[in-house]
Image (cartoon, helix red, strand yellow):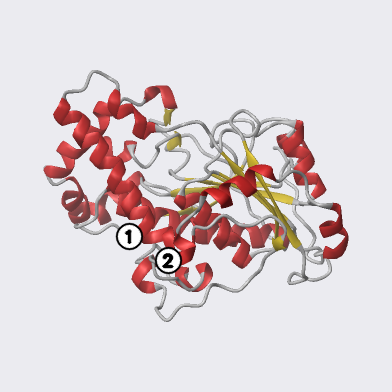
């Protein structure tokens, strides 16, 4: 069995975050920097936009409207849950952990319910959705695009976080264009920032040279319950397949497969009868984020306990080519027919089908 390395307890990890650029991704990057020593953030533009499929696929006008409304609601729900803390991190700003933004309102109103208690405390205080932090200006995006490798003067001034988890340091930021995630330039960016381990959420597949350089020290937040659902849109397809019990998140070590590495933790949202697909999705992100932070601390402290993925009778692997916008139309027909309330009524019964790594 492959061995996965862990950092010594006396040497806390310096983390780099690799994520994408949507509201949910920026929120997760900020939350990780509030909780952990994050010295680099790479924002990848993945080149994948399923919302654009509404114009294709031979849909009727009514079907196209359903697909457009579906993705408009996703944007609204993500703004509601995450928009209060979704600004891009600035290159050269302090590395984590950093204080949460101040707010007169508590986090509960924005964060809502997650699968485990304590999410609000981990993620930090919320800022009202109308605050300046909610928007991302074109100037902010341009400044990220212009950043390159970690500035030498910042690296020299930062000191070494190995001796103190809370030591002052700078955070390097880089925008990663489609096709450049696994490039030599991205690896150099991470190495110049002196990252010890990677935290990944929402990117394209990692491959060499990143897999080789950080072998056993790459933790992924996969929105789906592996080994049951792997690949893309793996909280969409459990709903479409009338299996909401398989909605959740998997925090796992990355290997060369697709969401197939040893599991560190699972997380599942608390689904209520009035939930829609996107409130369920946002709850899942919050629940998974908490477990991602936990796993990062376990790696840093030498306490990882990875569980190899097991065989299941009907494993599902969905790729981008499997998606058709008519699936969205069908899902909304199922929702109108009571998909979520029916699941809530039988949730305790069907939960026994799912093996989880807590």
Q: Is residue 195 left or right of residue 335?
A: right
Q: Residues within 10 Å of mark 2 (few under 14, many from 20)?
A: some
Q: In the figure, 138 relative to 39: above or below?
A: above
Where is mark 1, residue-wise?
270
User: Which secondary structure, mark 1?
Assistant: loop
Q: In the figure, 241 relative to 152: above or below?
A: above
Q: Which mark sits nearer the N-terminus, 1 or 2? A: 2
Q: How far is mark 1 from mark 2, CA to CA?
A: 9 Å
Where is mark 2, residue-wise?
116
- Residue 155 is situated, as x and y percent measured from the top left of the image, at 84, 57
Q: Which mark is residue 123?
A: none
Q: Residue furthest bottom?
A: 104
Residue that appears at 66% across and 68% down: 97
Towards the viewer: 79 or 258: 79
- Residue 298 is situated, as x and y percent measured from the top left of the image, at 66, 61
Q: Residues within 10 Å of mark 1 (few under 14, many from 20)?
A: some
Residue that appears at 31% across and 41% down: 71
- Residue 48 is situated, as x and y percent measured from the top left of the image, at 46, 31
Residue 272 seen in this snapshot = yes
């Amino acid at each position: 069995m492959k061995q996965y390395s862990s950092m010594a307890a006396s040497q806390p990890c310096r983390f780099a975050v690799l994520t994408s650029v949507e509201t949910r991704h920026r929120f997760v990057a900020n939350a990780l920097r509030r909780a952990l020593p994050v010295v680099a953030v790479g924002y990848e533009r993945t080149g994948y936009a399923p919302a654009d499929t509404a114009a294709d696929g031979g849909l009727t006008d009514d079907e196209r409207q359903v697909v457009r409304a579906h993705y408009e609601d996703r944007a609204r729900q993500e703004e509601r849950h995450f928009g209060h803390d979704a600004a891009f991190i600035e290159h050269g700003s302090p590395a984590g952990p950093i204080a949460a933004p101040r707010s007169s309102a508590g986090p509960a109103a924005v964060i809502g319910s997650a699968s485990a208690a304590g999410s609000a405390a981990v993620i930090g205080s919320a800022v009202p959705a109308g605050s300046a932090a909610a928007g991302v200006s074109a100037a902010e995006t341009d400044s990220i695009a212009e950043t390159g490798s970690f500035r030498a003067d910042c690296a020299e001034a930062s000191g070494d976080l190995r001796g103190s988890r809370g030591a002052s340091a700078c955070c390097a930021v880089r925008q990663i264009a489609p096709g450049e995630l696994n490039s030599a330039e991205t690896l150099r960016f991470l190495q110049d920032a002196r990252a010890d381990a990677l935290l990944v959420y929402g990117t394209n597949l990692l491959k060499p040279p990143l897999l080789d350089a950080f072998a056993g020290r790459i933790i992924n937040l996969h929105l789906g319950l592996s080994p049951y659902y792997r690949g893309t849109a793996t909280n969409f397809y459990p709903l479409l397949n009338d299996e909401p019990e398989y909605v959740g998140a998997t925090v796992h070590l990355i290997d060369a497969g697709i969401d197939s590495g040893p599991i560190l933790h699972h997380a599942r949202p608390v689904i209520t009868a009035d939930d829609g697909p996107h409130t369920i999705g946002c709850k899942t992100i919050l629940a998974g984020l908490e477990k991602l932070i936990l796993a990062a601390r376990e790696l840093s402290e030498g306490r990882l306990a990875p569980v190899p993925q097991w065989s299941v009778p009907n494993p599902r692997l969905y790729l981008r080519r499997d998606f058709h916008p008519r699936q969205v139309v069908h899902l909304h027909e199922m929702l109108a027919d009571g998909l979520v309330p029916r699941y809530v009524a039988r949730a305790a019964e069907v939960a026994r089908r799912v093996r989880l790594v807590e």
